Amino acid sequence: MGVTLQEKQVRRAYALFSPVYDLLFDKIFYPGRVEAIKHLGIQRNDRILEVGIGTGLNLALYPRDCHLTGIDLSVEMLRKAQEKVIEYGMGNVLLKVMDASAMTFADDEFDRVLATYVISAVPDPVGVLREMKRVCRPGGTIVILNHFKSANTVVGAMEDALAPFCTRLGWKTNLALEPLLRAADLTPEVTARVNFLNGWRLVKCGNRK
């Protein structure tokens, strides 16, 4: 608690991780990614925004008949994502370097907004969720997939203890879900536990404005 991520820590961490990110994080987090895309409920010609698209590990999971925009703070990660866009021949994808807490998109620009393994790795998680809500149209879908602080007292204390170390690596271990959703004025419609030991939570919210 009381440990705050700084933008320079995030940039440094993902510049460092970008060459090996896929090797470290692809397979172990793949089941959650599949579920997250499924819960978006993508329809033909939907406008999709993926926040923190990183190296583009989710790209192959999207249908080709949607319009996908992916943003990330890390230029190095986006270079890897662009390589995948070219490899997969995905002409429906646009990638942009952008701060997710201060997006340049118009209000209600997207039908569905996704953030996988991102919210605990940004300096201002509430600001990012508020921006996701702003750019998503009324009645649209917002899906968040992330590790959040455990309700178990012992596990939660361990996550607090690890927070200063993990913050230096670019993410927080002790971000609590319920206060975060309240602060962003988001109400979950679906919550599910995914991945190894069910240690990550998938949250689907309808965008009520």
Image: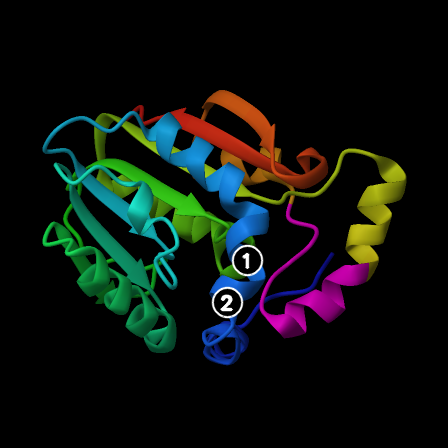
What's the amino acid at mark 1? Answer: Phe
Give yes or no for residue 168 being in the magenta stretch: yes
| Residue 169, picture quadrant | bottom right
- Structural crowding at the residue carrying mark 1, measured as other residues with C-alpha within 10 Å and reported as few (<14), some (14–19) or many (≥20): few
The x, y position of residue 207, in whole percent, is: 31, 27
User: Helix or strand or loop: what does disc 1 sit on?
Assistant: helix
Q: Which mark is residue 115?
A: none
- Tell me if residue 64 can be seen: yes
Where does the magenta region start and end? 162-175
- At which x and y percent is residue 36? 43, 35
Q: Is residue 13 magenta?
A: no
State the separation of the CA atoms marked 2 and 1: 6 Å
User: Which part of the image, by quadrant, shows the N terminus?
Assistant: bottom right
According to the picture, the residue beneath numbered tag 1 turns out to be 25
Disc 2 element? helix
Give the vertical position of 33 relative to 90 (above or below). above
Q: Which residue is mark 2?
A: 21
Give the farthest residue toward the top. Answer: 189
Q: State the quadrant of the C terminus.
A: top left
Q: Nearer the viewer, residue 116 or 79?
A: 79
The answer to whether 206 appears left or right of 97 in the picture is right
Q: In terms of image quadrants, where is residue 18?
A: bottom left
* Residue neighbourhood size for the residue with mark 2, other residues' Cα within 10 Å, grouped as few (<14), some (14–19), many (≥20): some
The type of residue carrying mark 2 is Tyr
